[in-house]
Amino acid sequence: MDTRTDAAALLKDHRAAIDRLDAILVYTLAERFKQTQAVGRLKAEHGLPPSDPAREAQQMARLDELAKEADLDPDLAKKFLSFIISEVIRHHEKLQR
């Protein structure tokens, strides 16, 4: 085998792994949003505010530690969680209406 063929085979393997991980991320995110929708309904039923800044700060700190343990850039992890939290709050606000 030449190096191009070897590289092509390795690339194919890496891409297959990435595709599997993408599927895991999507299904995990879907499950997370099912849970946050339940939280949003509970908050709406009991007149609780759509956001919880103390909980969000705890989650950011927790995610920072997890990212470091996983050897992932903590800033990337925080950006990802910030996006998710903003979407969750948006959904909770919608449920309050």
Image (spheres, grey):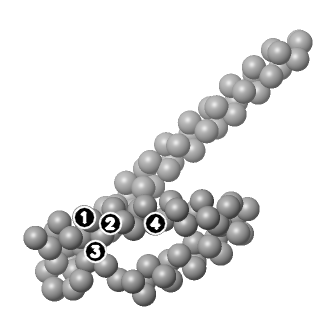
**Spatial CA span between label 4 and label 1:** 14 Å
Give me the disc on residue 88. Answer: 2
- Residue at position x 21%, y 70% in the image: 93
- Type of amino acid at the residue the image marks with label 1: His
Residue, disc 4: 82
The one of 29 and 75 positioned closer to us in this rendering: 75
- Type of amino acid at the residue the image marks with label 3: Val
The answer to whether mark 4 and mark 2 are in CB contact below 8 A is no
- Relative to 48, is 8 above or below? above
Q: Earlier in the sequence, mark 3 or mark 2?
A: 3
**Spatial CA span between label 3 and label 2:** 10 Å
**Spatial CA span between label 1 and label 2:** 5 Å
Element on which disc 3 rests:
helix
Give me the disc on residue 91. Answer: 1
- Type of amino acid at the residue the image marks with label 2: Val
Element on which disc 1 rests:
helix
- Residue at position x 71%, y 69% in the image: 69
Q: Earlier in the sequence, mark 3 or mark 4?
A: 3
Q: Earlier in the sequence, mark 4 or mark 2?
A: 4
The answer to whether mark 3 and mark 2 are in CB contact below 8 A is yes
The answer to whether mark 1 and mark 2 are in CB contact below 8 A is yes
Q: Earlier in the sequence, mark 3 or mark 1?
A: 3
Residue, disc 3: 39
Element on which disc 4 rests:
helix
Q: Which of the 4 quarters of the picture holds residue 52?
A: bottom left
**Spatial CA span between label 3 and label 1:** 10 Å
Residue 13 % position (x, y):
70, 30
Q: Earlier in the sequence, mark 4 or mark 1?
A: 4
Q: Quadrant of the C terminus?
A: bottom left
Q: Which residue in the rendered view is the most extreme toward the top?
A: 1
Q: Nearer the viewer, mark 3 or mark 1?
A: 1
